[in-house]
Image: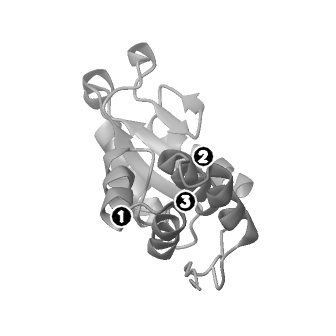
């Protein structure tokens, strides 16, 4: 962000001085897939909310991220049923293939890899989720094919770091 994007300013102004801080942060998160520091400063200034409060809300909710996230999220179930059925090997394979650890985002910002405690479909374990699509009974062989298919579907994100200029 080399300047204040019109959509960002409109979102903040739509929420108004008494508007919802969470709503403004949700709009920013949807646009950039994370909350750039300069955008949080802009929200603070436009809504008249202390920056410490903006940061507090941004770090309280799991849905918000302070670091860039991938265009798509790969979640590996690490619950007991998935764990005993090989989730660790699946995670290791994904980490080595993508070049990031759990919680990380690929350099091209295609994918963010994360683990979750349980997805609630234990009979299908080990389970992966790409955004909202579950893939069960995963093996290391199947994960290679699955990831190749996923990589063909997702274009790299070549957006530079975001920086908002404030007046």
For marks 2 and 3, give the CA distance: 20 Å
Q: Are marks 2 and 3 in contact (CB under 8 Å)?
A: no
First of labels 2, 1 by sequence position = 1
* Image location of residue 142, percent across then percent down: 53, 39
User: Label 2, on which residue?
Assistant: 145
**Residue for badge 3:** 70
Residue with the most extreme top position: 123
Q: Position of residue 68 (x, y in %)?
A: 49, 66
Q: Secondary structure at mark 1?
A: loop
> Nearest the camera: 132 or 11?
11
Residue at 43 percent of width and 57 percent of height: 65
Query: Is residue 55 depicted above or below 84 in this figure?
Result: below
Quadrant where the N terminus is found in the figure:
bottom right
Q: Is residue 124 above or below residue 62?
A: above
Report which residue position mark 1 lands on: 50
> What quarter of the picture does the C terminus occupy?
bottom right
- Neighbourhood count class around disc 1 (C-alpha, 10 Å): few under 14, some 14–19, many 20 upward: few
Residue, x 72% and y 56% (percent of image)?
A: 152
Q: Going by the image, does 59 lie left or right of 158?
A: left
């Amino acid at each position: 962000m080399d300047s204040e994007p019109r959509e960002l300013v409109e979102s903040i102004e739509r929420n108004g001085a008494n508007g919802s801080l969470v709503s403004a942060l949700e709009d920013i998160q949807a646009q950039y897939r994370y909350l750039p520091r300069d955008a949080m400063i802009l929200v603070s200034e436009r809504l008249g909310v202390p920056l410490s409060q903006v940061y507090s809300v941004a770090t309280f909710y799991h849905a918000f991220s302070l670091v860039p996230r991938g265009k798509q999220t790969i979640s590996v179930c690490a619950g007991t049923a998935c764990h005993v059925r090989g989730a660790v090997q699946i995670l290791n394979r994904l980490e080595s293939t993508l070049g990031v650890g759990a919680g990380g985002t690929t350099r091209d910002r295609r994918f963010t890899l994360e683990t979750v405690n349980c997805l609630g479909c234990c009979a299908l374990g080990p389970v992966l989720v790409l955004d909202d699509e579950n893939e069960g009974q995963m093996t290391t062989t199947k994960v290679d094919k699955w990831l190749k298919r996923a990589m063909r579907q997702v274009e790299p994100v070549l957006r530079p770091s975001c920086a908002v200029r404030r007046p």
